[in-house]
Amino acid sequence: MCPGIITVQNVHKSYGRTKAVNALSFTVREAECFGLLGPNGAGKTTMMKMVYGKAERDAKPEGLIHVSGFDPQHNPLNVRHLLGVVPQDDNLDGELNVYQNLALFAKFYGLTGKAAKKAIEPLIETMELVDKRHSKIRELSGGMKRRLIIARALLNAPKILILDEPTTGLDPQVRHMIWDKLRQMKKNGITMLLTTHYMEEAFQLCDNLIIMHKGEKIIEGPPRQLLQQSMEKYVLDIINKDHVDKIQACLDSPSIRADLSKETLHVYSDNIEALNEISALLEPGDYFLRFSNLEDLFIKATGRALDDAG
Ligand code: ADP
């Protein structure tokens, strides 16, 4: 018996000589939001595609993917009926209006006429698109299009929602609104598999996540627990490095980890006093002292260099 609604065990996927996914295993429990994080090229989309049956895993070494007991490779239709997919691109039909876009998809699920209306109307309401029902796609804002795509993915009342960077390119207000909608869905028992570039999004939505790098799992767990276990509690961001020589001696302390990015010196520690002592040597305005966050953990796990990001 598989313990989760999605089980992935020792999955490999190569494109020619590129190892997109390398010996990946994870389990998604029912009604949780599970995040796949990682820099560009880490293998997140490829992993998602294997879950919803759009890409085949390598035959050797032999791996396993089960979605509610079905193998997406052998039972693609069974899996597709369980899933709603929110792809990265806005692939709505520009010639049709909001309602017609949903009606077209409803037809794929065998819903027409009154049955289609019964499925579509509550989704238009939930996604706050009532006033836009007859609007053409080009008349919608980016946030409205996203909400329509999410509504479309929910037409077949899926048990699992696949979300590939659901809020990329949206402004913060819209992003927060979509997070609220996704939280509601989770409360309604929908399981979510999410990729995102926004660490705040992962922190807000995910019950569990993995950080991937070059196809491999680097770290796995609930975000708060990962932060507690794998990250220093505080960060001193020194934004003006002109005076860094003044603090050089303090950086040698074993309770301190320093990490230099292009413009900023990040000094991590669990010892707030040590960071206060360093900041006292600097000019006000040259630094910020803050709690560490998932973005700091992400950088610790995957490195800072852009060429590391494939
Ligand atoms: P991510 O979603 O984390 O950005 P991807 O899964 O898109 O990563 O890509 C992982 C790796 O696989 C990258 O090196 C990418 O270039 C490669 N890749 C993805 N899809 C294809 C494809 N269809 N053909 C060849 N290479 C691919």
Image (cartoon, helix red, strand yellow):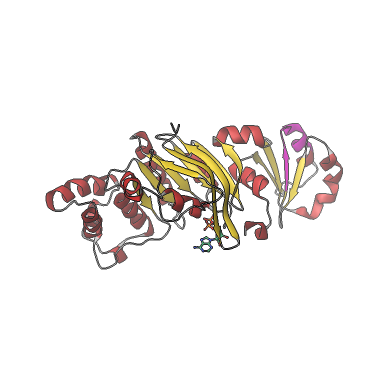
In the image, farthest residue toward the right: 249
Q: In the depicted view, which residue is nearer to us: 226 or 270? A: 226
At x 41%, y 44%, the residue is 179
At x 27%, y 52%, the residue is 129
Q: Is residue 11 visible?
A: yes
Q: In the depicted view, which residue is nearer to us: 35 or 147? A: 35
At x 48%, y 40%, the residue is 204
Q: Look at the image and tell me in which quarter the C terminus lies.
A: bottom right
Query: Up-down: is 271 above or below 48?
Result: above
Residue 31: x, y in percent? 39, 35
Quadrant of residue 144 in the image? bottom left
Indicate left or right for 200 with 285 as reference. left
Query: Up-down: is 161 above or below 137?
Result: above
Indicate left or right for 73 with 9 as reference. left
In the image, farthest residue toward the bottom: 95
Q: Is residue 229 magenta?
A: no
Residue 37: x, y in percent? 54, 47
Residue 225: x, y in percent? 58, 32
Query: Up-down: is 300 above or below 17?
Result: above
Q: Look at the image and tell me in which quarter the N terminus lies.
A: top left
Q: In the depicted view, which residue is nearer to us: 165 or 274? A: 165
Q: Is residue 173 visible?
A: no
Q: What is the tally of numbered marks visible in this picture?
A: 0
Q: Is residue 272 magenta?
A: yes
Residue 250: x, y in percent? 84, 40
Report the magenta residues as a range: 266-277
